[in-house]
Image (tube, rainbow, N blue to C red):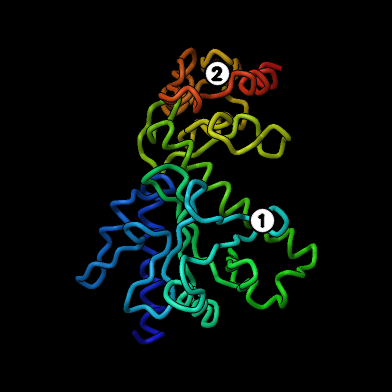
Amino acid sequence: MDTALESALRVEIMAWVRERAEANGGFLHRHELLSFRIDGRDLPLIDFSRGIRNPQSFGSTLSIVSSASGPYDDVESPEDGLLHYAYRKGDPFTGDNRKLREAMRTGQPLLLFRKEVPNYYTPVMPVYVVDDYPEERSFLIALDESFRYMGDIKDLAEPQRAYARRLAKQRLHQPAFRTRVLLAYQTRCAICSLRHGSLLDAAHIVPDSEERGVPVTSNGLALCKIHHGAYDQQMLGISPDYEVAVNREVLEEIDGPMLRHGIQAMHGRVITVPLRAVDRPDRELLAWRWERFTA
């Protein structure tokens, strides 16, 4: 396939993935990715059984999958925020590895899919193959094309490393957290049960600026955007017993139907929690947040 045509297809594919993921709540189901069609032909965006997708007509790799429970050691470095993506099985200079190396040479953007939960994938795109470590049998994947032009990636200056870590937080950790939380809550708001994924957020109980604010499901709540905003603005709180309380001043306020039905009517409700106990809001973390709300 002509390189310009392949580049144009990648742009079109990424636009479709972005649109579908946003409609769902930030993720796609395996079936959506395997059944993708373009220009009247099938073009699965992930492989049926492997963590890399190399369409026969493409000169470079189209997508890679990173999974914590996969067979390869795909590890994000805490030092530089870059993904060390292990060589695929076999000869390092043929097959899958050859097409990854070609992506590095040409600068073609890839799609990265994070498999946080079985059958559900969080897209991170575009990503770029920026270096090749034969001695480690791994490629280095960056979240920004600028890393292609930074020289020796092994010897990045601290400001560049800090930039990479910020990117990892914004484009890897936060979207993955949203996926895990929304799926745990079956893509519905814990307070009002709204089910439109595009209108839902994963709210931190303890903010990620705090030491205890880690991006785990038990520190998260699936909230619609209005209730997320109200929670962050201390207009409402959630007790360690999972009960919603609306700020007294807000309860006494007289305004239109949105305030009355959207917020005031939630006072005294018990939130909907995930089916799995391990995913439910940590009561100690709720108590931490509740203390600040009641103060």
Residue marked by disc 1: 77
User: Considering the numbered disc 2 on the image, is that residue within a helix, a strand or a loop?
Assistant: strand
| Mark closer to the chain start, 2 or 1 | 1
Task: Classify mark 2: residues with Cα within 10 Å, few (<14), some (14-19) or many (20+).
Answer: many
In the rendered structure, the answer to whether residue 115 lies left or right of residue 284 reads left
Residue at point 59% right, 34% down? 204
Residue 216 versus residue 72: which sits nearer the camera?
72
Residue 251 versus residue 140: which sits nearer the camera?
140
Residue 177: % across, % down: 53, 42
User: Considering the numbered disc 1 on the image, is that residue within a helix, a strand or a loop?
Assistant: loop
Q: Is residue 182 above or below residue 12?
A: above
| Spatial CA span between label 2 and label 1 | 42 Å
Kind of residue indicated by mark 2: Val
Residue marked by disc 2: 246
Kind of residue indicated by mark 1: Ser
Residue at point 21% right, 70% down? 41
Residue 186: % across, % down: 38, 33
Task: Classify mark 1: residues with Cα within 10 Å, few (<14), some (14-19) or many (20+).
Answer: few
Q: Is residue 290 above or below residue 180?
A: above
Number of numbered discs overlaid on the protein picture = 2
Residue 38: % across, % down: 26, 69
Check whether the beta carbons of the residues at disc 2 and disc 1 lie within 8 A of each other: no
* Image quarter of the N terminus: bottom left
Q: Is residue 34 above or below residue 156?
A: above
Residue at point 71% right, 39% down? 209
